[in-house]
Amino acid sequence: MLTALLLIWPVAAALLLHFVRGNAARALAFGASLVELALAVFVAIQFQTGSQPQFEINQPWLQSAGINFHIGIDGLSLLMVLLTAFLVPLILLASFRHDYENPSVFYALVLFMQTGLIGVFVAMDAFVFYFFWEVALIPIYFLAGVWGGERRVQVTLKFFIYTVVGSLLMLAGFVYLYYMTGANGGARSSDLAAFYNLTLSTQEQSWVFLLIFAAFAIKMPLFPLHSWQPDTYSEAPAPATMLLSGIMLKMGIYGTLRWLMPIVPKGMSVHIPWIMVLAVIGIIYGALIAIRQRDMKRLIAFSSLSHVGLMIAGMFSLTAVGLQGTVIQMLAHGVNVVGMFFIADIIERRTGTRQIPELGGLTRATPLLSVTFLVILLGTVALPLTNGFVGEFLLLMGVYQFNPWLGAVAGLTIIFGAVYLLRMFQRVMLGPDSSFSSVIRDLTGSELAVLVPLILMVFWIGLFPGTFMHISEPAIQKLLVLINR
């Protein structure tokens, strides 16, 4: 029942927003997101560490076809549910500084998207997973296409084409697996456990892997399927960008861990070499392009591409440390990237620009902004004792165990990250005075209310990573057993 409440509550609040306007819509959306966070924390408190799903609901959906509405939570999905429930209230609070047209519709879409995201993380049936995958994608089309920047129409269309093609390929893969569950005369099923028990040839697994991985590779994204990302991140309104970067891209990584690696391990092994090469290329490419960026949001977007490349490489190293590093880095990246985009939005809102050469000397009048910016930036750079360090260290260990040369190249992300991020901070906050240096305002109370929880998570994950690794470790060990069977 708790899992169902996590899905029902945001939908109910989104529907209620139809009847309220203005500040009341903001209050209702934010209050509903806080209740959702409380529910997620209660689930975490009640959760018993182990590899088996808990708080399950398994009811007939299309009974004649063997499709059930099956949802549940294990350690892997719990961390993603907590990340979503933690970030959405902060994203909503960050959006209150903007006067969006039709705010009740805007906030309702955010809550609908939250339902889709959590549904993806708790789904235990392939078609339930696909349903919530689409539920999570639909709101972002409208958030970016209606409230985005000047190029929103063409950018959103590009994003739409990418994601729809990927989703259809994933659906084709799921349909094939569904039919194969009844290949020996048994009843067909789309349940996750039924997919795990399938016996397919290496060639069959290889093709299924390519079909399903297409959707996940686009969503992460994996180089060279990334071209939608910087444009969408730049043109989408700040809350939509935070949702995309902080939570939505985790759908692809989570889907690979849950719905791909354990189902078609032999087919996956055929493709690991080129995926690892593309992931490492993405690490270097994203970092080098980030160094050349003049727009703060585009720099952060390419930085995200580089960091995601490392997560993909660590994940496909198929080592315990690599998989655990992927999970921890998903949490760290979600916290850091939301903070970075929020700070970029703060600066743009106060100055009217996010062009790095036009800024400078902002720290003179903004000590609070400077400190919070630097802390989150250092977490992104993976400074020891911050959240980014734990995940990147484990990921690099995993890649090195897979191939020392690839590990050495992937390790350049730490050096490049320090270059483009510290240089951005120096030019924006510490550089020569600009026309904004003496007039820019420091952080307000509501902005601190967003940034302080993010900073607390930067240090919590960095200083006490065992809190989160203890939750996910049994699920990771189960994945490794399934992959190596």
Image (cartoon, rainbow, N blue to C red):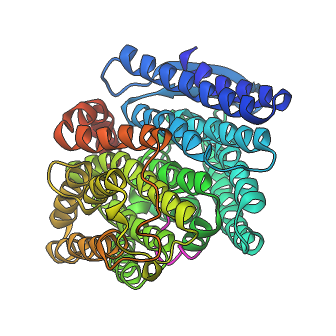
Query: Which residue occupies the foreground of this view, 292 or 245?
Result: 292
Does residue 421 appear to the left or right of 357 in the view shown?
left
Say which quarter of the image contains residue 124: top right
Q: Is residue 94 visible in this depiction of the protein?
A: yes
State the quadrant of the C terminus: top left
Residue pictured at 50% horizontal, 73% vertical: 298
* Left/right of residue 188 with respect to residue 372 in the rendered view: right
* One can see residue 197 in this view: no
Q: On the picture, is 105 further left or further right than 8?
A: right
Which quadrant holds the N terminus?
A: top right
Q: Nearer the viewer, residue 188 or 165?
A: 165
Q: Can you give x and y, in whole percent of width and height, for residue 61 in the image?
A: 74, 26
Residue in view at x 47 percent, y 64 percent: 439
The overriding secondary structure of the stretch rendered in magenta is loop
Queried whether the magenta region covers residue 286, the answer comes back as no
What's the magenta region? 221-227
- Residue 226 picture location, percent across and down: 53, 73
In the image, residue 18 sits, relative to residue 59, either above or below, namely: below
| 293, above or below 207, in the image | below
